[in-house]
Each structure stands twice: as C-alpha cells, then as structure tokens.
Image: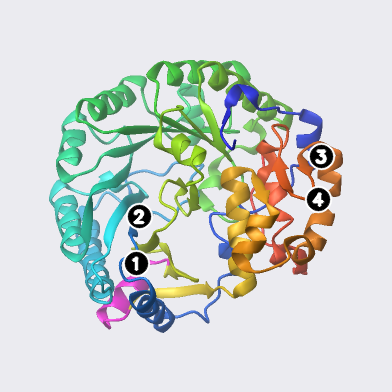
Amino acid sequence: MASAAAADLVLDTALVKKYDGFGPRYTSYPTADRFHAGVTAEHYVNALGARNHERPTAPLSLYVHVPFCNTVCYYCACNKVITKDHGRSAKYITYVGREIEIVSGLIEGGPKVEQLHWGGGTPTFLAREEMTTLMGMLRGGFDFAPDAEVSIEVDPRKVGADTIAFLAGLGFNRISVGIQDFDPIVQQAVNRIQTEAETMTVIDAARGSGFVSVNADLIYGLPKQSVAGFGATLDKVIAIAPDRIALYSYAHVPHLFKPQRRIDVDALPAPETKLAILALAIEKLGLAGYVYIGMDHFAKPADELAVAQMQRKLHRNFQGYSTKPDCDMLAFGISAIGKVGASYIANVKTLDEYYERLDANALPVMRGVELNADDLIRRDVIQKLMCNFELDFAACGAQYGIPFAEYFAPDLASLAPLATDGLVELTDRGLEVTMRGRLLVRTVAMHFDRYLREAQQQAQYSRVI
C-alpha cells in the first residue's frame, strides 16, 4: 500500500548525504523552468476550446493568487507585493474579476468546480468587502459543486476569530495556517513574530466555525533553529493536532529571492543539524500517529489526503498534494499557473503587466508549455511515483500502449545504484520506493525526467532534503 505511518519511515543519514542533490519538486511535468514564451494567450484559448469539445463536463479546480503582504518574511520565496495600501488590493481584485469574466466566458458544458484555493502572499490582506466581491465573482462565473473543497492560506498575525467566522460564511471549509516555528529567537531572525496565542485563536476559531480541515505549515532549516528548539515547536503543534502538517525544507537562494539576503548565513543550521531536526520531526509525528503522504506532507490517517492516497486518487499540482486528480486547474492573478489538458499556462509576474494585458481585454499569459506524447506518459509516471511510491509496468504500459520496460530502458537502468542502496526495489513487474527511499522520492522521480537527462545546463532547484 502507498500510505505509510511516519513511524515506518527510515532516514538513513549516509544515503541522504549521498543523494541529497538539487532537484524539482514535481508540482508539474515538464517543470516550470521548461515553460517558454512561445505559449501565449491564444494557446490558452485553444486549450479551453479543446476541453469544451473533448470533456466539457470534466470538473474544475480554481486558484487565485493574492500577492499582498503587510510585512516581509525573510525566508519567503513567493511572488508578493509588500504594502499597507488597501487601495492597491481593491484595484487588483477588479482586474482579477476581468480575468475571471474572460476565462469563464470561454468555458462550456457547465462543469462543476470541485476545488478552490486562495494563496499568496496573504489572501487575508484583503478587506472583507474585497473578499466578498472576489468570491462573488468566482461563484458568478463558475458553478460550484455542493461539496467543493474551498481553502485559504491564513497569517494568524493578521486575523482574529471574527475574520475566521467571516471566511466560513463565504464558504471556506479548509484552512492553512502558517506557523514555521514557535521559537521567538527564530521568529526574530526571519522577521515573523507570531505568538502561540495568535495561532491558537485562528485554529480554535476554524474548528468552531466548521472548517473540516486545518493544515499547519512548518519550516526546518531556518536561521537560529536547533534540534531542541524545533522539538519544542513540534510538541506544541502535535498538541494542537492539525489534520495535516506541511514540513518544508528551507532553501536558501538569495540570488533568486531578495528578502533572503537579509538572513544571516552564519545563523543557518549546519547540514547535520538540519538532518537531525528532520529526523526528530519524523519520529515525533510518527509517534503522534501521522501518515507520511510524501515529500514534506503528513496527515492524520482519517484525513482526506491519506484516504485519497490509499484509494490511489492522490494528485500533485502547484498547490502540493491534492485529492482531485481529474480536475483541470484555472489560475487567476499574477504569476498564477494553471493546467488545461496537455497545456500549462503561467501568467505575467508583475501588476503593471497584468493590468496592461487586461486593459487590452487580453488574457495575461506570459509563458507555458504544451505537452507532447512522451511528456504525457512521463507526467503520469512521475505523478504515480510522487503520490503512490510505486509503478506497475504492465498496467502503465497498457494504459499508453507501450512496452514499458523497453520504453523506459535507460531510465530503469539508471536506477541500479538506488536499488543497490535499498532506495527502490526493481522487478520485472514493477518498481517500489522503499521506506528507506521515500524521503528521497524526488531523486527517484528525476530518473524519469527526460529534460534533466538531456539538459546541457540544469536549472537551479532546491535541495531534495
């Protein structure tokens, strides 16, 4: 079975050091660094047209990127706009409405929206009337399923219990709460001072308002972190008992993200300390009964993510792991990335460009990629590895009409060292990522990435661990 108790994971320090290179997170395949400007708004329109013809009633997932934040967290790698001027967000919501109107006008067949997510930035930066307006535009443009998953990212420093109740009234039923670390020394080092009381106010209010899932975001590898300090944070988080926990590895790439230049490099934990923190997290979450979903996600056994994984219905997209594998994703706002069939579409990254395109009544597409037949096969193979930790060669071959072992002969041969080290088990019938290899599943997936194999110069990715 794909699901595994966190307690069953094996963190082999020697093997992690051996294989902990840099690699994609595989929220898409081909990965976003392969997107190009040759994919335009016209391609997006054509992809929507093909969808109308081929699968008009297939469900939809929607994503809205709200880039605004009051303050900057030094570790942040999101596309954001730091401001306290709510006039800027009011203008932005108006333009997002224009994009929603254009795209919804191109959708036929009355498909149901099964999933909506607001990310950022800080979505709760928006004033209540702005949030009401945005939700109204989304529901006006699309038909939502009665049981749709409607989720939002929340910064506990900026909202109270009344705001959480307001969000529930708008239809939100899932919430992701940024914690990162409760240690005040670490919080000071990353410019995010957040008390336990503020966090508990939000989580208690979410539960009291009927939210069906509470997710807590943590980051390990931040400046000033120690094994003991993060252990105390883990104990507090486990006591809160969120339904899901995202445990992200901090990637220090200040040449890509300017706020990270404010972090004292000498204060970052040594690689050995970072590994020890991860080991402690796995141990504590395992003892608390959490299931390891994959990558950096843990969930309670009864949570929908864990259930979806058991049922082989888990999916991975630009928001991480998802329970909706059959949805096309329509994405709105700056830097938002969507998927329609065999196409990925990425919006422009700046507000000025976004407004300029929409003022011309044009979709704000900046780049993307159209998948060929090989891409589609490899996308599915990598999805299966990232979500299920196994491949059935015969089933996959039959699905795509290929002799799997022959088609992927170079890829399978390249896995021999990983098999020798016990990260994967290879037979004539299939491949399974072992408990020793699951923390390194990105490394396994990379062996099926044709673009990595053929690239003369690899893009800059985060570390695997």
Whether residue 22 is visible, yes or no, is: no
Callouts 1 and 2 close, C-beta under 8 Å: yes
- Give the amino acid at mark 1: Leu
Height in image: 392 above or below 358?
above
Residue receiving disc 4: 415
Q: What segment carries the magenta color?
A: 349-362
Q: Mark 2 and mark 4 in contact (Cβ < 8 Å)?
A: no
Comparing 178 with 190, the one in front is 178
- Residue type at mark 3: give it: Lys
Q: Residues within 10 Å of mark 4 (few under 14, many from 20)?
A: many
- Disc 3 or 1, which lies upstream in sequence? 3
Assess disc 3: are there few (<14), some (14-19) or many (≥20) residues with their C-alpha within 10 Å of its C-alpha. Answer: few
Q: Residue at x 70, y 42 (%)?
A: 432
What residue appears at the point 27 percent right and 77 percent down from the top-left corner?
Answer: 106
Mark 4 falls on what kind of element? loop
Q: Secondary structure at mark 1?
A: helix
Between marks 4 and 2 in the image, the one whose residue lies nearer the viewer: 4
Q: Residues within 10 Å of mark 1 (few under 14, many from 20)?
A: some
Q: Of the residues tagged 1 and 4, which is closer to the observer? A: 4
How far apart in space, not on screen, are marks 3 and 4 (Cα)? 14 Å
What residue is pinned by disc 3? 18
Let me know if residue 361 is in the magenta part.
Answer: yes
Coordinates of residue 122 in the picture (x, y in percent): 33, 46
Residue linked to disc 2: 67
Q: Residue at x 53, y 52 (%)?
A: 258
Badge 2 vs badge 3, beta-carbon distance below 8 Å: no
Residue 303, image x and y in percent?
A: 41, 32
- Amino acid type, callout 2: Pro
- The amino acid type found where label 4 is placed reads Leu
Query: Does 111 appear above or below 45?
Result: above
Circle nearer the N terminus (3, 4): 3
